[in-house]
Structures are given as structure tokens and as C-alpha cells.
Image (cartoon, coloured by chain):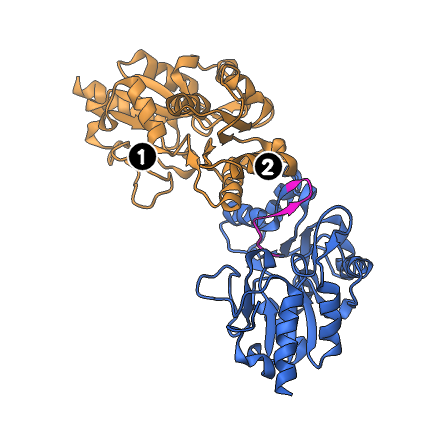
Chain colours: A orange, B blue
Amino acid sequence: MADTGWPGCAKSLKGVILDLCGVLYDSGDGDGVAIPGSIEAVKRLKESDLQLRFCTNETQATREKFVAKLQRLGFDISVAEVFPPAPAAIAVLKERGLRPHLLVHEGLLPEFDAVDKTNPNCVIIGDAAENFSYQNLNEAFRVLIGLERPVLFSLGQGRYYKETDGLKLDVGVYMKALEYACDLKAEVIGKPSPTFFQSVLGDMGLKPNEVWKTSGIFMHNDLSGLQEMPSDERHPTVTADATVDNLAQAVDVILGQRGRGA
Amino acid sequence: MADTGWPGCAKSLKGVILDLCGVLYDSGDGDGVAIPGSIEAVKRLKESDLQLRFCTNETQATREKFVAKLQRLGFDISVAEVFPPAPAAIAVLKERGLRPHLLVHEGLLPEFDAVDKTNPNCVIIGDAAENFSYQNLNEAFRVLIGLERPVLFSLGQGRYYKETDGLKLDVGVYMKALEYACDLKAEVIGKPSPTFFQSVLGDMGLKPNEVWKTSGIFMHNDLSGLQEMPSDERHPTVTADATVDNLAQAVDVILGQRGRGA
């Protein structure tokens, strides 16, 4: 791929935000598999002067367990560099004095160990998978309907995702279910929520136009800059800066342009 | 209650459609309990020259089992007079050559015994309660997402209902979940769908303005005529003809007016 069409702003970049699943690795049996060239691409970004962060909507495991998996796949990534929804949600709880009722995957529960969950005044749902039983959803509903001002946080708003044994319903489906049951609008924490990206930018100390981020997965050959914060990754008005097949190609282009500019 | 405010059209009525739960009986432990005066009120309507039908969104039992319960409570009601969503759905399947994948309460399954369910080309959901497991909802989703033209029928669109042990999520919540997952709009079969009421009117051979029907439950003191087919029982433009506390009072007013007119 030639670098025609790639924005001229690569030279002014100060940071990169990468998606994980679909960009660094494909999920599947066990840990899944690293996408060819992505381990080396991450290494090259780390050796550059660019700041690097990773965004994920992973809510089936704690950040520690999730990063350990990435490390087993061969990636040089630390816990502090990875931004999943749960820690962002915990920050919101603290800020607003909220105590959650949790409907999440058991793998995520340790993330909330230090959070006060007595006498809950909000509900948090994540990708709970099998935990989305009728009884558990009904319990979350009863907590919400019993609150004077019900607050529902959803860790993502995905419709479904693919696993080796087929398609699986994602958290967004149950978010819509509870929204209808309680006649309310959930607050989404995670991609593609603008406030979620803002928290990553805040951690980097950078402005949106100083950062390049992957948008969704390369399957769609879709890479967007962060010129604007998209409210939906498939938003028709957000167009890709350039089209590449994988992270390795993207890093080639970015670092190549920066090299020529130096 | 005086009969002022009651429409003058009672004399021209030819039929009555009654809700069941909340009008004839309250649900609860076992069969629930008949609402005082309602057994006698049904008897008086049957002895009059008015046609009588019963509408319900009951989808946890076959029509036979459901009517047997009403008879145990003391009501003189036969299977042919009761209109639940399942038989209406079966009529639609036949008309459109559809074979359903069912996600319903096991109590309802016998209703579909004679229906071809091989190689399904649509999905029907009812108030499946505990059967709304993650696995079962995911299975219904996979059927829908695999169809070229996915069709989802929902037997009702209720948000929740009350049982003795508390509030329970109703079928509408899971309808919204699948609508979001598959990016489609479900077809509702049952109250308050106008086509559902139309099928009852068709069975009576009557026009909407010849029929009086209860709307929702008396808890809301809300009785509406069938001057127009409401698309939502809580529709703000549909106002009650009169307010009474229970079916017995309503029948007093109707039969009283007709008696004076005779």
C-alpha cells in the first residue's frame, strides 16, 4: 500500500491509541492468536517518541488477567497502558457517590472488590454472558425500578461478537432490555463513548488532534483519526484517514512519514 | 357511582370484550382470586343479548389450561370465548407460510404441537420467564441473524407484571433485546395490537363501534370504548368513557341503560 491518502498530520502526532481485539489479536480458543506483524508493530511504536495506550471493551476479566493474556501472546504491554470500561466506571461511581448492583461476568468481580456495594443506588451491567439469566436480569431490574432516580451504567453497547463456537449476544442487548423495562436511558461507559476516550486522552495529557487511533477492527479496513470524537464507530460522517490491512502497515506509514520529516 | 358521563351508546351495543387478569381476577398464589362481583357480572352479560369475548396476553399456558383455571375460580367461560395471542400467531404463520423457532414458556408448547417447526424461518417469543436464559436468547438470536429476511413475532409487549413474590420482566423486554441485536422491528401479536382486536371483532361479526371493551385493569379506573383501536392502552388521546371501580359496576351501568331503553 502506498501512503497516498494518508493525512499529512503524522508528523505532528504525539500519541497513538490502539484497539486490542481485531487489531493486536484475534479471539478464539484459549488466548486467541496474535495478528501477524502486530507484536513487532507495538514494539516499534514503543521505541518511538509517541505515547501509546490501548483501549478495550473487555469486561469478562480483570485488567491484570487480561494484560497477562496479552503478554502470553507476546506483546510488551503493561496494566497501566490498558483502558477497559471497569476502572472508568469505578471512577464515575466515586465521583457521583454511587454504590452499584453488579450484573457482570464473574471474571470481572475482583475489579470491584474495593467498591461499596451495600444498599445499591445504581446498576452496572457488563458482558455477563451466561450470567444474563432471567433471574439475574430480573434482580437488576428490581433494583432499578425500586430507585427514586434509577441509574444504569452499561460497560459497552455492542450487539454481538464472534467466538469460535458462533455469535454471542453482547451487553448492549441487555442494556436495551433494561432501558425498556424501566423506561430510562443507560449511560454507556467504554468504546465508543466520547467521555471514555477523553479519559484516555487525559491520561496521556494530549488533545484529540494530537492522537491517532484505530477505529474498530481491520476486517473493515477502517482507520479513523481522532479529529472528532465519534459517538458510534460506524457513524457515516466519520471517514477513515487511510486504508491499511493491518497494524504493521499503519505503523510503517506513520513512522515512515515522521522519519522523513525529521 | 352515578351513570352520568357514561356514553349514550350503551343501547346500541352488540358485544363486550373483557380483559381477564385485573378485571375478572387478580393473579397470585395458585389460581389467583376472583374479583368480588365479577363472576356474577359475567353471568349477567351472558344472560343478556350481548355477545361476549375475553382477551388475554396469557402465554404461559395453553388456552385449555388457562380456561380450566378460570372455571375453577367460578367463571362460566368456555375455550372458544377466550382469545390469547398464541392461536392468533398460529393463524399468521399459516397465512404467511412461516415455520417458527419458539422461545416460549413450556406450558405454552402444546399449543404449537401441530405447527411445522422444521428449518425455522421466523422466531416467536412469549412470556418465557425462566426460559429466557442467555443460551436460549442467544439461540433465538442466531436463528434470526441467519435468516435472509428475519421475522420476529412477540406475543405481547409488556414491560413487567406483578406476582406474589414481586415484579417480573415480561416478554416486551426480550423483544427489545432481540430487536436491537438484529436491528429489526418485531411484529406484536396480542394486546394492544389493533390486528389482534380486529381478529376478535371478526369472530363476533361486529364493528368497533358496536363493542364495548375494558382497557387495562381497573386499578387505573380506566374504561375505554372501542370507538378507535388504540395502538397503546396508555395512549394519551384515548380517554375513558366512564370511570367505575370494577366490572360489576360497569355491567350495572350498561345493562341498566339498555333496560331503560327497552
What kind of residue is marked 1?
Ser
Any mark on residue A224, and which?
Answer: 1
| Foreground of the two, B225 or B149 | B225
Residue at label 2?
A137
| Foreground of the two, A76 or B61 | B61
Instruction: Check residue B163 for magenta coloring.
Output: yes
Does dot 1 land on a helix, a strand or a loop?
loop
Q: Is residue B57 above or below residue B229?
A: above
Return the chain for callout 1: A
| Foreground of the two, A210 or B199 | B199
> Which residues make up the magenta segment?
B156-166
Residue A76 seen in the figure: no
Residue A73 seen in the figure: yes
Instruction: Check residue B236 for magenta coloring.
Output: no
Q: Residue at x 53, y 28 (%)?
A: A101
Q: Is residue A15 left or right of residue B125?
A: left
Return the chain for callout 2: A
Q: Which residue is drawn at 44% across and 37% down?
A: A149
Residue found at the very far bottom of the displayed protein: B262
Residue found at the very far front of the displayed protein: B2
How far, Cα to Cα, is label 1 from label 2?
36 Å
Q: In this view, does B89 lie above or below B140?
A: below
Q: Where is residue A259 in the image (x, y as percent from the top left)?
A: 22, 18
Q: Position of residue B259 (x, y in %)?
A: 65, 82
Callout 2 environment at 10 Å: few (<14), some (14 to 19), or many (20+)?
A: many
